[in-house]
Amino acid sequence: MLKDVQEMIASIDPTESESLPVRMVGSDNSINVQDWLVRLADILEETDQFNQSAIDYRSVRPSSFNRPLVSIITSLYRGRSFLEFFLENITTQTIFKDDCELVIINVSPSEGETELIEQYQKKFDNIQLVNIEERIGIYQAWNLAIDRSSGEFITNANVDDLRHQDSLEIQAKALLEQPDVSVVYSDVFYTFFPNLPFEFSAKCGLKTNLPAVNKFNLLRCNSPHNAPMWRRSLHEKIGSFDASFQSVGDHDFWIRACLEGVKFRKIEDTLISYFFNPKACLLEKAVQQKWKAISLLIFIRASTANSFSHEKQRTLFFFRLNCLLLHSMRLKLTFKLQIHIFFMARTSSCLWVYTVQRFVF
């Protein structure tokens, strides 16, 4: 494994990444990708072997529950290069074999994906595969996976992210021990090239500092963004993910949950290795046009609501407007349209102030 990682580092072209600064979510700090690679190289020089037990997690297996306890939902689209590492990482989770199910929605399957998943299905009868030929969005895929699943708890898993081997057990245990908590989440380690084993990302120690979830913090930071675990009953209370979102649909979902008084809890252990993919951050022109259309749809729907006097409606509108403003600047919407959005934001004083901040700063 050590040799594989060293070869991966040697194969990286620093000209593609050395000037890319990445801000750590939850703080004002950022790191240059090349600096991170230097840090990783130093770690590899320290020892020829990595001691996986150096990361000390308490693992207390739940004693009684309805099986499957946890449903893992995954949307797969053109992810063949990540898929084998992902499947190996998930199926070696401490409670996967007996207490979990994995539901994969494979959108527009590409060569080799179905065959590889079917190989794992022969080993594990708790893996479901649903091939969807048409192109659907991630939140529509998640909703479909949730409908196909039966676990008491649900978590999403991205194919380019990796977990600590006890992550599902730790998350499930937290929900079992605290019946009043509906959502658990944790900080994540960053990695800047794909399929780096979790242990190396953890050893580098570059991670988020996510704030606690409340109405104010959640508008500024989507703390439960990466691999949270939540109760299935949450969907009975607030519905499904809004499939009209191309992105940030999970943020919208957590906003709705928070407004309904749902309790969130941050787990202190860092359980996930998050792959920061520079290519995913560079939207192609066609995708940008779709973003403009969906952002306008969100804005029109929110701005034509019956009343903004109710706190929940106002806050949800606040969030959706903020999303639109952020993407209008990133996608360079016309100045005329930005001015129109600006004046529409004067629906309330707090929206107006926040809008000014977003445009000026």
Image (spheres, rainbow, N blue to C red):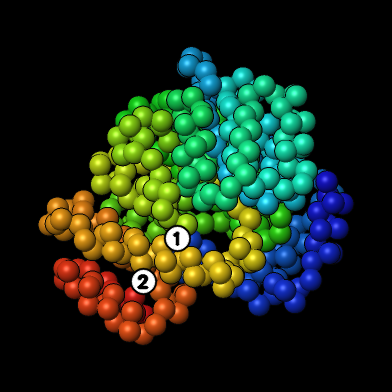
Tell me residue 170's x, y (percent). 53, 32
> Which residue in the protein does label 2 denote?
325
User: Extreme front residue here?
Assistant: 134
Tag 1: Cα neighbours inside 10 Å, few (<14), some, or many (≥20)?
some
318 sits left or right of 174 in the view: left
Tell me residue 117's x, y (percent). 72, 35
249 sits left or right of 306 in the view: right
The type of residue carrying mark 1 is Gly
Kindly identify the residue that appears in the image at 63 percent across and 55 percent down.
275
Q: How many marks?
A: 2
Kindly identify the residue that appears in the image at 72 percent across and 48 percent down.
110
151 or 270: which is nearer to us? 151
Kindly identify the residue that appears in the image at 22 percent across and 77 percent down.
343
Quadrant of the image occupied by residue 245 = bottom left
The type of residue carrying mark 2 is Leu
Q: Is residue 349 above or below residue 163?
A: below
> Which residue in the protein does label 1 denote?
26
